[in-house]
Image (tube, rainbow, N blue to C red):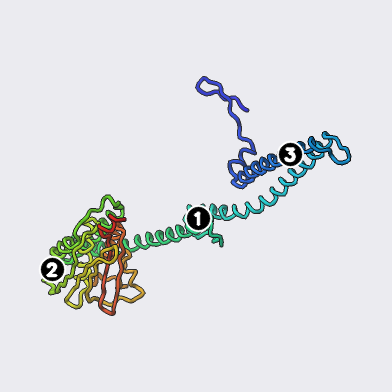
Amino acid sequence: MKSLKRSGEWGIVLLPTKGLFFWRRSFLLKLILINLLVIAIVIWLAGVSVKDFACLLTKQYQVMGGASGSLFDQTMQFYLIRAIILAVIVACILYYFLVRKLILPLQNLGVCAQKMARGEFYPCQEISADDEIGRLISDFNHLAVKLQQTEELRKKMVSDIAHELRTPLTNLTGYLEALDTGVIQGNQELYHSLHEEALHLTGLVEELHQLNIWESKRLGWNELQIIPVEDVIASALKSFELELDHRQIKVEANIQAANILGNKEGLKQVIANLLKNVLKYDRGGWVKIAGKPVNSVYKVVVTNLGQPIPENKADQVFERFYRLDSARNRKTGGVGLGLAIVKEIINQHRGEVGLISREDEHSFWFTVQLANQEKEK
């Protein structure tokens, strides 16, 4: 004990002892002591019961050989104490090795968690058991894989943003410096080129802004409204009507009426991004939009002819900044965020997105929850 004076008052502070330190830090020690206490109580109660019952019998019947009752009590007590001590020792040995085997995976899990905190996303060693500890390690490994993927995507996104910004900024800086120093004279073609570079930067920043908005929204079920899906699709098509006519792209719509749970502005943006994708890559002069209920969801499919997409790249088109054109030529596409925004919005609606490719014909599809089905749930 140690006296401590604070704010004019005297108090007593108990310094932590070595035993208390191990009690706080060792889960294995806690389990052993708690179970030893339980075992000792059970054995003691059983021994006392047996002893009392034996003593009761000695009072009713004569002990063999004329042994006195006190001698019988002493002998019984000696054997009971010896049995208790032996049982506790054997229990300690067995319990230590058995519990230690259970604690080792948790200790390894702690080491892996420390590595993860340092940025080393390595899965922990799996165990064959399917109990709570096995499931915990499996969930931890799944988390480690997801964090590793997120970290790789973050690094890739930073690299892609730097690549997307470098070219237009270099062009703008070079032309403006040349104009400022009088190396070149301004003309309509040059100003048009500079305007295109500025529009590209504006589009990139706007799509990044939209993606960030939807990633931070996290729509809850109470934020989703019951809306007629045919009205959402018709409104989106109406806003692209002039541009589709100008590009001579025929639209064939087959939309079945249904009420869905969703965010109207978000779903309009999904349709708009898919139609922008059609305008960028169209090669057939037509687009088909179909929508119908499928089980408990409503499925929308946008189909057109475009540039070939390899089968092994079908899932990657929804990733950020992904482009089929490895040279990243802006004349053949945008910045690679339109489909990533589609995926994020549909994920917010608890739906799914996908792509089905048949040579040059591509069908982008997504699903959202039907209002009636969700109400029944």
Task: Name the residue nearer the viewer: 43 or 179.
Answer: 43
Q: Earlier in the sequence, mark 1 or mark 3?
A: 3
Q: Residue at x 26, y 51 (%)?
A: 223
Task: Residue type at mark 1: give it.
Answer: Leu
Q: Residues within 10 Å of mark 2 (few under 14, many from 20)?
A: few
Does residue 165 show up?
Answer: no
Q: Which mark is residue 136?
A: 1
What distance separates the C-alpha of mark 3 from that of mark 2? 99 Å
Left or right of residue 184, residue 120 in this image: right
For the N terminus, give its image quadrant.
Answer: top right
Spatial CA distance of label 2 from label 1 is: 54 Å
Depth-wise, is mark 1 or mark 3 nearer the camera?
A: 3
Residue under label 2, please give it: 243
What numbered label is drawn on residue 53? 3
Give the left or right position of residue 99, taking residue 270 as reference: right
Tell which tag, 3 or 2, sits nearer the viewer.
3
Mark nearer the N terminus (3 vs 2): 3
Q: Is residue 191 left or right of residue 174?
A: left
- Tell me whether the residue at label 2 lies in contact with that at label 1, contact meaning CB atoms closer than 8 angstroms: no
- The x, y position of residue 97, in whole percent, is 66, 53
- Mark 3 Cα shell of 10 Å, populated few (<14), some (14-19), many (≥20): few
Q: Residue at x 56, y 23 (%)?
A: 11
